[in-house]
Image (spheres, rainbow, N blue to C red):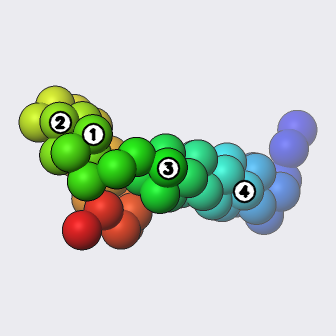
Amino acid sequence: MISKEKLQKNVDTRVGDFHDILQEISDTLNKGQRKQLLKNEKIKKAFDFFKVEYE
């Protein structure tokens, strides 16, 4: 059985990786593309949840 600590570390790593991916997406889009992408409420919620900078 996997230990609680190891499981938490795996979750933290995956969350960190996902944040990095979202931030990279945000950084590579120009302002107009980013604005269009953020019209999708699910994407905006993900960006907000992972504290991705998009302004």
Q: Residue at x 11, y 36 (%)?
A: 39
Q: Nearer the viewer, mark 3 or mark 4?
A: 3
Label ID, residue 28 = 3
- What separation in Å lies between label 3 and label 4 (alpha carbons)? 23 Å
| Element at label 3 | helix
The image quadrant that residue 52 belongs to is: bottom left
Give the amino acid type for the residue marked by disc 4 in the picture: Thr
- What separation in Å lies between label 3 and label 2 (alpha carbons)? 14 Å
Of the image marks 4 and 1, the number of the one nearer the N terminus: 4
Give the amino acid type for the residue marked by disc 2 in the picture: Gln
Q: Residue at x 72, y 56 (%)?
A: 13
Q: Which residue is mark 2?
A: 36
**From the image, which quarter does the N terminus lie in?**
top right
Of the image marks 3 and 2, the number of the one nearer the N terminus: 3
Q: Are marks 3 and 1 in contact (CB under 8 Å)?
A: no
Q: Nearer the viewer, mark 4 or mark 1?
A: 1
Give the amino acid type for the residue marked by disc 3 in the picture: Thr
Q: Which residue is mark 4?
A: 13
The image quadrant that residue 40 belongs to is: top left
- What separation in Å lies between label 4 and label 2 (alpha carbons)? 29 Å
Residue 16: give x, y in percent of width and height. 63, 59
Q: Are marks 4 and 1 in contact (CB under 8 Å)?
A: no
Q: Which residue is mark 1?
A: 33
Q: Are marks 2 and 1 in contact (CB under 8 Å)?
A: yes
Give the amino acid type for the residue marked by disc 1 in the picture: Gln
Residue 2: give x, y in percent of width and height. 85, 44
Of the image marks 4 and 2, the number of the one nearer the N terminus: 4
- What separation in Å lies between label 2 and label 1 (alpha carbons)? 5 Å
Q: Residue at x 34, y 50 (%)?
A: 30
